[in-house]
Amino acid sequence: MAEEFEPERPLTPEELKQRKRRNVAIGLSLGAFVLIVFIVTMLKLAGNAPQG
Amino acid sequence: MSDAAMKPEPYTLAGQTYALAGPEDYFALLKPRVMSLVIFTAFVGMVVAPGAINPLLAVVSLLAIAVGAGASGALNMWWDADIDAVMKRTEARPIPAGRIPRAEAAAFGGFLSVLSVALLALASNYLAAGLLAFTIFFYVVIYSMWLKRSTPQNIVIGGAAGALPPVVGWAAASGTAPLDAWVLFAVIFLWTPPHFWALALYKRGDYERAGVPMMPVVKGEASTRKQIFAYALILAATGVSPFLIGMAGFLYLAVSALLGAGFVGLSWAVLNAAEGDYTSSKRLFGFSILYLFGLFATLLIEHLAGLHG
């Protein structure tokens, strides 16, 4: 079983702020990735759809 | 690879900087300046390639190529963290500066490599995705892990990784990689040695300290200057070749001939400079960036403006 990471001290306000910024960046990146895959899938489907 | 010169892993610095890395540090791992050159040359490859690609798919393909290049940059920083720590040019990078742990950079780069190749396969085709995967492999394994520390020909052979993006872009747009695409590859491939050796001449001390066998460190300045000049001659001729094979028009011929003459002229100045005088090599390094940009920008303008093709 994996051991939990325990900080040796509470995070400082600056570290908490940076952690939040990292989390927001990861969230936005994941959201953008999902959107991109969705758009690409739709474009590919539209390209392969029979015309008329 | 030795970790002796590196700062301790940030997570072990209790009470110090272990949670201070921001998104910008992870972005810096992607080597954004290299990434911008990759985006530009891949875009030119896409535009010059025959056939049409949906503009949105082209944007996503370019994004995937850029992320793939960034991923290989992150993996390079992971592997070369010990070298980066002793070179002035690179000591402020996120790993040697102690802001990001090495293992995290490796995971970040590995994850983005897989993601970028998968995304390119989805947005364009398997040929482009395969070429991108090969580019990442070549840069990380062949160049960073093998050649960089073992031979003064490191950037000559390793230059292939930096030269592949226009071929990847071409393949993304057309699903093919014909000889024409490899002419663009050849231009960047032959441009790489004089570009990096001009830098290595005046950063020789850095490379010496880090134990990287760059040409000036191993063979000396005189030999490096001769080789720069020889490559400049071959590059100037190759730079014109897109016109000769019908890929470019007369505007390109004029620009490539003019810039090629400038490159040879500056290399001649490097060849004849006194030992320890690096003014000309600094000039050549700056001009080499302008040279490559000028060539690819002219190709782009010709094709976008309908002046050719």
Image: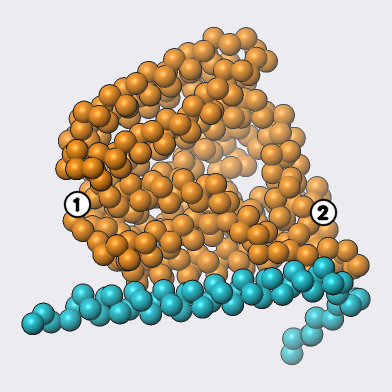
Chain colours: A cyan, B orange
**Residue B216 visible within the image:** no
**Residue B146 visible within the image:** yes
Q: Position of residue B178 (x, y in %)?
A: 23, 48
Residue at the image point whose x is 49% and y is 55% from the top:
B69
The residue carrying mark 1 is B50
Residue lying at the far front in this picture: please name it.
B305
**Letter of the chain that mark 2 sits on in the rendering:** B
Residue lying at the far left in this picture: please name it.
A52
The residue carrying mark 2 is B7
Residue at the image point whose x is 40% and y is 70% from the top:
B119
Looking at the image, residue B189 sits to the left or right of residue B249; the answer is right
Residue at the image point whose x is 30% and y is 42% from the top:
B300
Looking at the image, residue B262 sits to the left or right of residue B18; the answer is left
Residue at the image point whose x is 29% and y is 40% from the top:
B301
**Letter of the chain that mark 1 sits on in the rendering:** B
In the rendered structure, which amino acid carries the disc numbered 2? Lys
SS category of the residue bearing label 1 = loop
Circle 1 packing at 10 Å, graded few (<14), some (14-19), many (20+), is some
The answer to which image quadrant residue A1 occupies is: bottom right
**A25 and B41: which one is in front?**
A25
Residue B256 has which mark? none
Q: Position of residue A22 (x, y in %)?
A: 68, 71
Of marks 1 and 2, which one's residue comes earlier in the chain? 2
